[in-house]
């Protein structure tokens, strides 16, 4: 009886009815003292088999949802690690490469402005230096933003 009820959780109601009917048939073939109570128990299985099947399907849906949640949590963790790696790469690039190259350009422009005494060229170099300064400040702000 308990095994039939347990199978009703995982198989469809028609199969539960079939199994219960087969069990009733074999039960009728074997003589017992309290045959009527066993038939009542098996008949109750037929009656509650659809309910047991419904609970079984809901349990399977819950297991599937939990598996999806676990998968999404794993993906979220992987994406989080990827974002951290990208943040470190951007931080490294802004600190080491961009800043260093901007400073080199700045120093080259300083040397160039001392070599060239043309007022028009000095104005252009000053504009370039201001732009470099803005880029350098912007890269430092980006670095601070990434650290947060």
Image: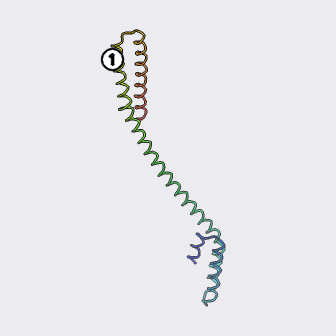
Instruction: Tell me where residue 32 sits by quadrant.
Output: bottom right
Q: Residue at x 43, y 15 (%)?
A: 124
Q: Residue at x 65, y 84 (%)?
A: 25
- Check disc 1 and report its element: helix, strand or loop: helix
Q: How many marks?
A: 1
Along the line of sight, the residue nearer the viewer: 61 or 51: 61
Left or right relative to 69: residue 46: right
Question: Which one is nearer the viewer's eye here, 111 or 1?
Answer: 111
User: Which residue is pictured at 43% across the width and 31% down the height?
Assistant: 142
Residue sitting at 43 percent across and 40 percent down? Answer: 86
Residue 113 image-quadrant placement: top left
Q: Quadrant of the C terminus?
A: top left
For residue 117, above or below residue 101: above
Left or right: residue 77 versus residue 29 is left
- The image position of residue 117, as x and y in percent, is 36, 10
Mark 1 nearby-residue class (10 Å; few <14, some 14–19, many ≥20): few
Image color mode = rainbow
Residue identifier under label 1 = 111
> Is 71 situated above or below 128?
below
Q: Nearer the viewer, residue 140 or 54?
A: 140
Please identify the quadrant where the N terminus is shown.
bottom right
Looking at the picture, how far across and down is residue 84, in whole percent? 42, 42
């Amino acid at each position: 009886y308990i095994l039939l009820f347990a199978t009703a959780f995982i198989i469809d109601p028609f199969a539960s009815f079939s199994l219960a009917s087969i069990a009733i048939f074999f039960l009728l073939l074997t003589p017992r003292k309290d045959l009527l109570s066993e038939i009542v128990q098996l008949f109750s299985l037929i009656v509650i088999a659809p309910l047991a099947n419904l609970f079984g399907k809901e349990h399977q849906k819950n297991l599937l949802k939990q598996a999806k949640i676990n998968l999404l949590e794993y993906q979220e963790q992987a994406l989080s690690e990827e974002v951290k790696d990208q943040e470190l790469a951007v931080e490294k690039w802004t600190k080491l490469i961009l800043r260093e190259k901007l400073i080199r350009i700045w120093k080259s422009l300083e040397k160039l402005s001392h070599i060239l005494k043309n007022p028009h060229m000095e104005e252009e170099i000053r504009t370039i230096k201001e732009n470099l300064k803005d880029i350098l400040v912007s890269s430092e702000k980006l670095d601070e933003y990434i650290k947060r």
